[in-house]
Each structure stands twice: as structure tokens, then as C-alpha cells.
Image (tube, rainbow, N blue to C red):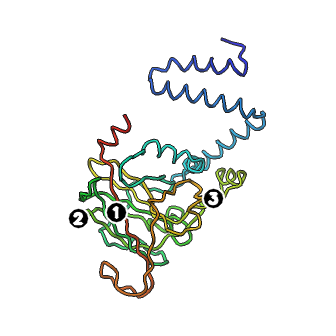
Amino acid sequence: MRNFDQFSITEAVLERVANAPDARIREISEALVRHLHNFIREVRPTQAEWEKGIAFLTDTGHMCTGTRQEFILLSDTLGVSMLVDAINHDHQTAVTESTVLGPFYVEGPPEVACGTDISGHLEGEPMFVSGSVATLDGTPLVNAIVDVWHSDVDGYYDVQHEENGLVARARLRTDDQGRFSFWSIKPAAYPIPHDGPVGKMLEAQGRHPWRPAHVHFMIEAPGHEKLVTHVFVAGDAYLDSDSVFGVKDSLIRDFTAHAQGAAPDGRVMDQPWCQLTYDFKLNPVSAAASQAA
């Protein structure tokens, strides 16, 4: 085929990708071509607008580093990350709900014992976090891996200040009752990095870059689906306008304020502190597999 017009070009491309030897690649490629061509026909970009779109994607790639993934930010802010999450975690059971990973996860965080203060040099309101990890029927999961990370009081993560090392981030393991605990500082609401192309996009769309305060959790246990989620601070001003669409009602909790005195682990506090408690339930691998089938 040759001499393509704005309609015949789509069929021509579909004919070419139909030869893909992998059936899944063929399916994805065909859907991509159909939707992308229909999008172009709908918005009818000028040549200059098309060039700006290419430049935007190029700038997005240039913004990526070892500690910043601008394409994840782009996916998050367009709701794609949460759409993928919803498709892959459409649970009908009472397991803990998942949400976006976010751009600041670090593989292999420092492993610490339960009860450790992971705040390092950071200043802020002390926060005691405790909880449990269990199966769907409530059976404790022993030695489950619990990765945690969160922002400081100014809304920045440790990897945004590399000279300070890894703080407010750790890996714990549940005890023989499936429980875990740690100390840190209460996180703050923060804007996602908006000094790059994603920030310019949000501004052009009339949107803010803010996320409500939260603590990240990634939990793994043999025989169960890995859980990636947050627990959000109740009452935060951005719960209903999270820039990455990650908030779910079941993930909102009170970070209960306490005055001076004894904490649950026996530590005596000489200043006000807050407490977060959350019990997680994981989805069995068998259930996850059946849902994906």
C-alpha cells in the first residue's frame, strides 16, 4: 500500500504490526496504533503542536536520573498509574487496598529491628508507627518484609538530599505475631517535583502539584501478592485533590496526637508525639492469579 491519507494510514500500520510473532506484543501494538491514530484525528494537531509534544517527551526523558523518574511522575499525574493499579488489584475481598508506588522508592533499604527510630538527623514531631501483617483470614504472617518510607516535615524525601543519606526509610520484618513497629517523624503534605516538564504540564492544565501527607508501605510475604500502598493523614487539605489520584478512604487514618508521657513501647516522651496504627491483610497468590486469568 502507498499514497496514504489520514484514514488509510491506520490500516496500513495495522497490517504491518500484524506480523509480530508474539501475540501479546501484537495485541498491544494494534491497540496502541488504533487509539493513537484516533487521538491525532480527534485533536488535529498542527505541525508546531506535534513538535512541542515530541519536545515534551524528550525533556521528560532528560529529566530522569537515578533518583528521579519523570516518566513515573507523568504516568502518576495523568492517572495512568492508578488505572494500571486498579486493573491489576480489583479485589473483591477484604485485603488492604493498594495505591501508587511513587517516584522515590529505593531498592534494598537499610534493614532495622522493630522499634528502631528511623528518623536519623531529621527534626519534627515524633511518630510511633505500629501494625500487623496477616492473611485474609487474619492469620499472622511471620517474618514478612515491611519496607517503609516517607517525607520530612518540609515534604522532601531523603533521595532529594543525597548528602544526608537514607533516612525516614527502612526495612523491617514482622515478629512471631506478625507485628512490626518503628519510630520516625510525622510526614508533611508536599508537592511532587514540578520544576520539570510534568510541572509545566500541571500548570498548563490549571492543576496544583500537591500530595496529602502519607507513609509508604511495601509488604511482601511468601504465598501472597506484594502490597504497595500508603497510609494517609486524616484531615489533610489535599485528600480530595491528590495530584496523582492515589487516595482511598480505607487508607486514611488518624495520626493520633499525644502529650508527654509513656508510649506503647515503654519509651518515655518529653514532648508531644503522634501515633499511627494500621493492620494490613495480604491477598493470597492463588487469588491474585485467578483474578489475572
Expressed as whole percent of the image width and height from the top left, the position of residue 289 reads 33, 39
Rendered position, 107 above or below 48: below
Looking at the rendered structure, the secondary structure element under dot 3 is loop
Mark toward the start of the polypeptide (2 vs 3):
2
The amino acid pointed to by label 1 is Asp
Marking on residue 177: 2
Badge 3: residue crowd in 10 Å (few <14, some 14–19, many ≥20) = some
- Amino acid type at circle 3 is Pro
**Label 1 sits on residue:** 279
Q: Nearer the viewer, residue 93 or 112?
A: 93
The answer to whether 267 appears left or right of 78 in the picture is left
Q: Is residue 114 left or right of residue 166?
A: left
| As drawn, 118 above or below 96 | below
Residue at horizontal 45%, vertical 72%? 255
Q: Quadrant of the C terminus?
A: top left
In-front residue for pair 288/195: 288
Name the N-terminal-most of marks 1 and 3: 3
Residue 230 x, y percent position in the rendering: 45, 59
How far is the residue under mark 2 from the one under mark 1? 12 Å
Callout 2, which amino acid? Gln
Q: Which label sits in the foreground, 1 or 3?
A: 1
* Left or right side of 208 for 226: left
- In the foreground, 280 or 118: 280
Please state which of residues 224 and 111 is positioned toward the viewer in this rendering: 224
Tag 3 residue: 209
Cα distance between the residues tagged 1 and 3: 30 Å
